């Protein structure tokens, strides 16, 4: 009888722990994924690559360009998987005014630069140490991608997860189409 009561207590404890773990996972996945609206956040961030390495770049500096903003981290496996795809998209559309802007706010600067070198990234990538950019963009994880039209406004659907996978590919292609077809701001 005591053995049965002990097993019942252990089973209840396991169920309670599993329920709390499930609640924690649910809470993490339900972070504020409210879509941003209006103008994209435009905090100046340090360039990690390109000839202007070390200077600052912001969304405002890119006004008039069609922008794909991609948050990434060097330790993120889906980020590693999608980076060659993003590089190919950039090469294909850069003469059309498309800029892919990679934002890293999770790494040491040296790790971020190593990542960019390893994957041959030539689109601009900036460094935002800390969580301010993540909060401004209401980031929910890595990778995460946004689309900013030529007027600096957010358009399309935010993409949570890698852009090169089947479930996100249609939304990515649509976002690229929207920013490329957007009108430049009037002077």
Image (tube, helix red, strand yellow):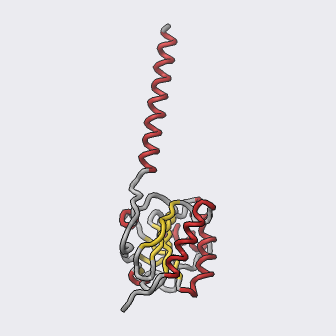
Q: Report if residue 14 is visible in the image.
A: yes
The percent position of residue 127, horizontal first and vertical second, equals 45, 72
The percent position of residue 141, horizontal first and vertical second, equals 47, 58
Q: Report if residue 118 is visible in the image.
A: no
Residue 26 vs residue 5, the one in the foreground: 26
The C terminus, quarter of image: bottom left
> What residue lies at 52% left-to-right and 69% top-to-bottom?
112
Above/below status of 185 relative to 79:
below
> What residue lies at 44% left-to-right and 80% top-to-bottom?
54
Above/below status of 34 relative to 125:
above
Residue 125 vs residue 66, the one in the foreground: 66
Residue 185 vs residue 61, the one in the foreground: 185
Figure label count: 0
Name the image quarter holding residue 37. Answer: bottom left
> What residue lies at 46% left-to-right and 32% top-to-bottom?
17
Name the image quarter holding residue 86. Answer: bottom right
Name the image quarter holding residue 120. Answer: bottom right
The percent position of residue 176, horizontal first and vertical second, equals 54, 75
> What residue lies at 52% left-to-right and 67% top-to-bottom?
111
The percent position of residue 70, horizontal first and vertical second, equals 50, 69
Residue at the extreme top? 1
């Amino acid at each position: 009888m005591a053995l049965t009561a002990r097993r019942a207590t252990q089973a209840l404890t396991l169920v309670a722990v599993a329920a709390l773990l499930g609640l924690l996972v649910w809470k993490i996945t339900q972070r504020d994924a409210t879509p941003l609206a209006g103008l994209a956040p435009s905090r100046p961030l340090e360039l990690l690559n390109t000839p202007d390495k070390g200077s600052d770049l912001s969304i405002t500096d890119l006004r008039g360009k069609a922008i794909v903003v991609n948050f990434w981290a060097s330790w993120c496996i889906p980020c590693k998987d999608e980076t060659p795809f993003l590089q190919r998209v950039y090469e294909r559309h850069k003469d059309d005014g498309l800029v892919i802007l990679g934002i890293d706010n999770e790494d040491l600067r040296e790790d971020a630069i190593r990542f960019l070198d390893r994957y041959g990234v030539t689109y601009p990538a900036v460094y935002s140490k800390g969580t301010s950019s993540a909060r401004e963009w209401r980031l929910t994880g890595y990778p995460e991608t946004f689309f900013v039209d030529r007027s600096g406004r957010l358009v399309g659907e935010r993409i949570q997860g890698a852009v090169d996978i089947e479930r996100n590919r249609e939304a990515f292609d649509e976002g690229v189409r929207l920013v490329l077809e957007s009108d430049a701001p009037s002077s």
